[in-house]
Amino acid sequence: MTTPPARRGGWSEADREREHELLARLAALPPDDDARGPIRDELVTMHLPLVHHLARRFRDRGEPHDDLVQVGTIGLIKAVDRFDPQRGVEFSTYATPTVLGEIKRHFRDKGWSVRVPRRLQELRLAITRATAELSQDLGRSPTVKELAARLEVTEEEVLEGLEAAQSYSTLSLDGSAGDSDGESPALVDTLGSDDAALENVEYRETLRPLLDALPPRERQIVLLRFFHNKTQSEIAAEVGVSQMHVSRLLVKALGTLRGAMGVDA
Amino acid sequence: MQSSEVVLTVPAESSYVSLVRTAASAVCSQADFTVDALDDFRLAVDEACALAIAAAPEGADLTVTFRTLGHTVEVDLLSPSATGSPIGTNTFAWTVLTALVDSVETEVTDDSLLGIRLRAHGIESVAS
């Protein structure tokens, strides 16, 4: 793999070799071996700067940095325990989505969300309903103009409502869809049939574990949209959620992938 | 056919992307995009902005030009590129962009400006 993994500023060649050596040794030991402890500790310590870096992305969101580092470190430990050097990806690339997942879960568990005024929440619900109805009537997804006419509001209000839908808390909707703790079905089971679709993507070896680390529903939606060229409405019908929800999950998933890959991948 | 142009210059920083996205929504709504197409276009603009910002040196500006011709919207993103390298057509980002809009073009000019052009279309709306 020639892709530089996200942020390893300050690492010497010796550090990197040490990392690879430790990871190989850890992978060779049985899960209950006492020798794992010190190796694990050293690996976690080595990668704490990564956790600090990722936690800083969430500053100004009302949670103390130290708390975020703490939950992020839990993600790091999980990543150390689950990493398989055979996969051929850099550890930091593998660990990033896991750490981010823990931090985001922390926000979710605390019920954090962008505060959306009640008026917009009602508008959002009305738009969701009208979008479904009009899609039925028209055989395609409606335009903003058509939604505005149906709801007897201005186009600007519809746009506002669509915007509000993006920041609406995903708490209630995604909670049940399996969590981003990496306990999703094995990569090979879910992605096997998508190999052909992924064929032409550079760094697909990097992409796979990242897709695998997404919550199952987000992964499914990403694959359907980008590798099977289904429309958002088609996906909504197939997965059994609203089009807005599909849109929101796509935004979320792409953000996660972008962050984890470094933007140029 | 109705045509118009909207030009937006913002600092090449992620905190300004929402502004570009909001402009994209308004422009696409004018051109009678379906909600599907509008959301796709916004996602593509997001992705393209992320690419431009990642390549841009500190303090650079990102110029976004929306052109509407009838129901077709074209957006040009132009920003300095520190690396001077174009966007690979075999990257995941490229896969995402091409899946979201009708056409994607990219180039790096002689003076190291990275350009990304996206094009998508709305429909003949039935509502008056």
Image: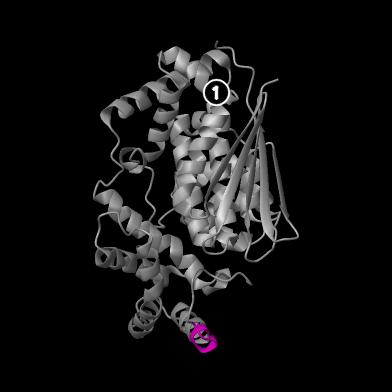
Asked if residue A185 can be seen in this view, the reply is no
Between A214 and B64, the one nearer to me in the picture: B64
User: Residue sitting at 69 percent across and 36 percent down?
Assistant: B102
Residue receiving disc 1: A141
User: Residue sitting at 25 percent across and 58 percent down?
Assistant: A63
Quarter-wise, where is residue A173 in the image?
top left
Q: Is residue A262 above or below residue B98?
A: below
Left or right of A243? Residue A204 is right
Between A108 and A220, the one nearer to me in the picture: A108
Q: Is residue A115 above or below residue B72?
A: below
* Residue A87 horizontal/vertical position (percent): 56, 68
Subunit of label 1: A
* Residue A50 horizontal/vertical position (percent): 41, 71
Asked if residue A223 can be seen in this view, the reply is yes
Magenta span of residues: A11-16
**Amino acid type of disc 1?**
Ser
- The quarter of the rendered structure image containing the C terminus of chain A is bottom right
Magenta segment's dominant SS is helix
Spot the residue most to the bottom: A14
* Residue B122 horizontal/vertical position (percent): 63, 25
User: Residue sitting at 37 percent across and 27 percent down?
Assistant: A124
